[in-house]
Image (cartoon, helix red, strand yellow):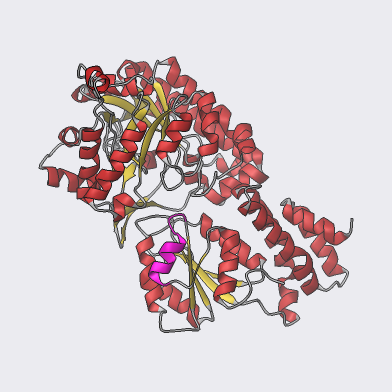
């Protein structure tokens, strides 16, 4: 089969056409990125992505903090530098989240400060938050900066219509709003949805022709079930999600939804709303091979390699075996992108296991030629 | 429908204002608040926990019910203390060192308090010293919560710290925790959700999993 470029490869997979090989994606914390670069003897993010056979460039950077972002041109702000894009797409700047670097027994981790609006009692209180505005940003720098990544399939990420609300309001407080004070929940849903719609629409007006995938991350699942009922999702959330999906499709992009946890029963609903790619297919909750068999004709899958168990506790050989199982089980007919079962690799995952994962993905993800298949 | 049935339903459906009104009325009428707690309120929250475990309700509904329950308990707490009512036991709970997630922990607290336990909430990012101090304040069970694979490793040092003290039990839970992991580190119990955490804590103390 003719070798494809990364964009062709990702789009073939997302269109249920068989690419030349299974495409791959990575995000990782900055500590993991540093270790990988050292182990693979590379300096740049681009060279790291190539060394791991990764096809997707996430515009916020591998570490979701040092990517390509519009320049900040708004009022003086403690989280942004005037005239600079050095905020790199880090969403904690948008939502005034003070990040701390936590040393855990397993390595370094980012955590966020208490949500600013967790004690708000009314919409009037919430109006006091320093809500971001799309006019704060100048997107004219992005096209030039994206040129360096033209070998990759470009993904715009950082959107959220549920999870980011919990960073500002607090998870417990927001779920109580949804169940007990829906007018407050509605206010917050609208604020976030309106901002992100405007932000990404402005971005896509500038560089939409260069972007293959628009990604939104909202964790609707817990380890065992969904966080909220389908009824609540349909009533309060689905409309905002659909708005972002339609935005992606209006620019001829694929839409990726990230949601950790056991959302298996919701997959048909996501497909019905127009989600093209579903991530991360957390394998501790649902086997990716089984999910592909059941839903592979309605949604493309990204993910499926366990980071709670095998990537953390296994040997490189065990990682290789699991990647072989998942990749060969999911690759038929396209519709699968290799990625970890939590998309941002954390500091507890050994370097050798990450390299083993992507090497195995490259080895076992090659689609055979028609001749080879026919003569088997 | 008796007033107690209405109170039961109000807790199950998370009608906080109704719970407050009915509990206050009971107090004003000089009713036996211990009986109200044990025969109406705790069973109501237990049903909420069962519905959650069965997948009939989800986290938002559980939070609303627990909030309604707590509003009622806040009214009768001073009277319970005066009557000499003792909690089932005193427990402490915290998210382990490095872990700032707390919604699971908070659900467990709601279920434990709603089941008659006195709970010392140690918050998040708790070092061993915090758990030790809570035990010195009278906690008989140390409950540990961890959401992340990067922080679950902090549970074993806590278990080891209390290993030689039979009078202190350690019960664990969280998204990345399993019975297998709990057994590996030598914990005294594992709860797979907030409702099951109550069972695990009760059984660690040698009590039956469900209050009579």
Q: In this view, does B162 lie to the left or right of A316?
A: right
Q: Is residue A308 left or right of residue A168?
A: left
Rendered residue at 27%/44% (across/down) = A321
The residue lying furthest to the left in this view is A41
Residue A320 position in % (x across, y down)? 25, 44
Q: In terms of image quadrants, where is residue A238?
A: top right
- Image vertical order of residue A275 relative to residue A40, above or below: above
Residue A348 position in % (x across, y down)? 29, 54
- Image vertical order of residue A364 relative to residue B12, above or below: above
Q: In terms of image quadrants, where is residue A208?
A: top left
- Image vertical order of residue A321 relative to residue B93, above or below: above
Rendered residue at 36%/37% (across/down) = A303
Residue A369 position in % (x across, y down)? 23, 20
Q: In this view of the protein, which residue sits in the foreground, A261 or A130?
A: A261
- Image vertical order of residue A347 relative to residue A282, above or below: below
Q: In this view of the protein, which residue sits in the foreground, A23 or B29?
A: A23
Q: In this view, does B35 lie to the left or right of A314?
A: right
Residue A212 position in % (x across, y down)? 33, 21
Q: How many marks?
A: 0
Query: Is residue B133 shown in magenta?
Result: no
Work out which quarter of the rendered image holds the N terminus of chain A and state it: top left
Decide if residue A107 is in sight here.
Answer: yes
Magenta residues?
B175-186
Q: In this view of the protein, which residue sits in the foreground, A113 or A132?
A: A113
Decide if residue B119 is in sight here.
Answer: no
């Amino acid at each position: 089969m003719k070798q494809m470029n990364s964009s062709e490869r990702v789009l073939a997979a997302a269109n249920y056409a068989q690419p030349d090989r299974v495409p791959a994606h990575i995000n990782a914390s900055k500590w993991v990125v540093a270790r990988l670069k050292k182990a693979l003897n590379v300096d740049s993010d681009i060279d790291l992505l190539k060394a791991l056979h990764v096809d997707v460039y996430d515009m916020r950077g591998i570490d979701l903090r040092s990517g390509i972002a519009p320049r900040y041109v708004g009022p003086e702000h403690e989280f942004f530098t005037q005239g600079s894009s050095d905020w790199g797409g880090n969403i904690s700047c948008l939502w005034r989240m003070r990040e701390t670097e936590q040393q855990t027994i397993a390595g370094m981790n980012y955590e966020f400060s208490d949500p600013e609006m967790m004690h708000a009692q009314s919409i009037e209180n919430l109006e006091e938050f320093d809500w971001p505005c799309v006019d704060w940003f100048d997107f004219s720098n992005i096209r030039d900066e994206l040129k360096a990544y033209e070998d990759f399939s470009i993904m715009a990420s950082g959107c959220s219509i549920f999870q980011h609300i919990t960073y500002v309001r607090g998870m417990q407080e927001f779920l109580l709003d949804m169940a007990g004070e829906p007018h407050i929940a509605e206010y917050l849903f609208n604020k976030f949805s309106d901002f992100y719609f405007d932000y990404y629409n402005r971005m896509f007006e500038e560089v939409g022709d260069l972007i293959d995938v628009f990604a939104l991350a909202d964790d609707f699942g817990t380890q065992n079930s969904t966080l909220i009922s389908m009824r609540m999702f349909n009533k309060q959330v689905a409309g905002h999600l659909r708005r972002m999906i339609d935005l992606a499709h209006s620019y001829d992009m694929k839409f990726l939804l990230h949601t950790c946890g056991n959302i298996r029963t919701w997959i048909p609903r996501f497909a019905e709303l127009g989600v093209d790619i579903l991530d991360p297919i957390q394998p501790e909750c649902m086997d990716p091979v089984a999910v592909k068999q059941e839903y592979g004709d309605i949604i493309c899958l990204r993910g499926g390699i366990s980071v709670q168990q095998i990537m953390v506790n296994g040997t490189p050989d065990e990682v290789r075996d699991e990647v072989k199982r998942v990749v060969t089980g999911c690759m038929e007919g396209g519709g699968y992108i290799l990625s970890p079962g939590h998309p941002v690799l954390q500091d507890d995952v050994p370097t050798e296991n990450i390299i083993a994962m992507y090497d195995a993905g490259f080895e076992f993800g090659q689609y055979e030629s028609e001749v080879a298949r026919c003569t088997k | 429908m008796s007033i107690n049935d209405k109170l039961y339903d109000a807790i199950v459906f998370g009608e906080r204002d109704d719970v407050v009104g009915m509990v206050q009325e009971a107090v004003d009428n000089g009713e036996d608040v211990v009986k109200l707690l044990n025969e109406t309120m705790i069973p109501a929250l237990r049903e909420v926990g069962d519905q959650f475990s069965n997948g009939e309700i989800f986290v938002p509904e559980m939070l609303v019910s627990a909030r309604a329950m707590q509003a009622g308990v806040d009214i009768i707490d001073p009277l319970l203390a005066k009557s000499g009512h003792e909690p089932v036991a005193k427990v402490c709970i915290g998210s382990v060192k490095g872990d700032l997630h707390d919604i699971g922990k908070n659900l467990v607290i709601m279920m434990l308090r709603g089941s008659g336990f006195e709970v010392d909430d140690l918050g998040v990012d708790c070092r061993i010293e915090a758990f030790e101090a809570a035990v010195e304040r009278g906690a008989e069970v140390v409950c540990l919560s961890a959401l992340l694979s990067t922080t679950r490793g902090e549970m074993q040092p806590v278990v080891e710290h209390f290993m030689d003290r039979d009078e202190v039990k350690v019960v664990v839970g969280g998204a990345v925790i399993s019975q297998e992991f709990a057994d590996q580190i030598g914990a005294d119990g594992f709860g797979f959700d907030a409702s099951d955490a109550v069972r695990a804590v009760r059984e660690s103390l040698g009590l039956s999993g469900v209050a009579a």
